[in-house]
Image (cartoon, rainbow, N blue to C red):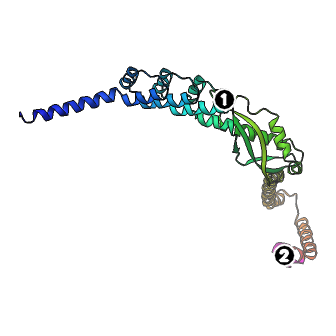
Amino acid sequence: MENLSPAFLIAGIVILFLVFLYFFPINLWITALFSGVKVNLFDLVFMRIRKVPPSLIVNSMITSSKAGLHISTSELETHYLAGGNVPTVIKALISADKANIPLTFKQATAIDLAGRDVFEAVTTSVNPKVINTPNVAAVAQDGIQLIAKARVTVRANIAQLVGGAGEETILARVGEGIVTSIGSSVSHKEVLENPDKISKLVLQKGLDAGTAYEILSIDIADVDIGENIGAKLQIDQANADLKVAEARAEERRAMAVAVEQEMRAKTQEAKAMVVQAEAEVPKAIADAFRSGNLGIMDYYKMRNIQADTDMRDSIANPNSGSGSTKPGREEGRQS
């Protein structure tokens, strides 16, 4: 145990030295001192305690100082603790300063904390980017569908990056403007002949109001002819009218069939009444014989008249009667 005591002592001294160097980054303090950045060594110790990486803050201070920016360590530390990206903010401030774009540290940190890439915003402000719109379909007044595609050149508006609308709003507004422009054209040929008419009309609407971008130009990249929507609508309307007419005709036919069936029922009823009445004739003749109102000669005359009537019917319609007569009537003719 006595032999191990010096080893433990040396290990303890080394550990204490490493802990001292961790909380007291002397090399980082010396680097900042020779770079012209005044940083208190105890400030670096307190950064360690607050779990802020001193190297990040010191390197950012050195970069901003060399670029001529005046930013304190407390401001950088506060932005880091708020969840911001300190190196990105420093790069954005340096790029904006070199490009003569007014951008303060407070604006940059606000843009960064809002979830936008402040360095990309400054880059877009210096070098505008092009946004390609999806295919926008619209119909001219002559019923022809046109499919247009545009390229929108935008530049970031630094003042509107916080609270301003993004690219989706720009694309939606441009698409709405294209639809309005094509829809107001009398003929699709006008649009095909002068596609710049669409871009001029859309630019006049001030579509970049309230957005984080400034629209520099809108160029119609392509215009294609789609379907003949007007003819298609007329065909659909004609088919609908045809179905309505067929339904009305079917209704009239059903009413006619009902009337015909009703007439047939009445005819059958009348025939049944006639047959029933004819069945009563022999009874009436018998009653006439018994009462003396009808003589035997009168009866035979009546039979002869019926036989003559049947013969005339058979001559007029040879296929209907087949030349046969009732036995009672043939007997009357012979007598």
Residue 263 placement, left or right of 87: right
Q: In front of the other: label 2 or label 1?
A: 1
Above or below 232: residue 81 = above
Where, by quadrant of the figure, is residue 95 drawn? top right
Rendering quarter of residue 261: bottom right
The magenta segment is 318-329
Please state the horizontal and vertical placement of residue 335, each as a whole percent of the image. 89, 76
- Residue 262 visible at all: no
Mark 2: few, some, or many residues within 10 Å (few <14, many ≥20)? some
Amino acid type indicated by mark 2? Thr
Residue at left offset 83%, top offset 56%:
291
From the image, tell me which residue sits under label 1. Answer: 158
Residue at the extreme front of the image, as rendered? 34
Specify which label sits upstream in the sequence, 2 or 1: 1
User: SS of the residue at dot 2?
Assistant: loop
Judging by the rendered image, the residue that carries numbered circle 2 is: 325
Q: How many marks?
A: 2
> Going by the image, does 198 lie left or right of 60?
right
Q: Position of residue 315 (x, y in %)?
A: 93, 76
166 or 272, which is in the foreground?
A: 166
Q: In this view of the protein, can residue 74 be seen by the observer?
A: yes
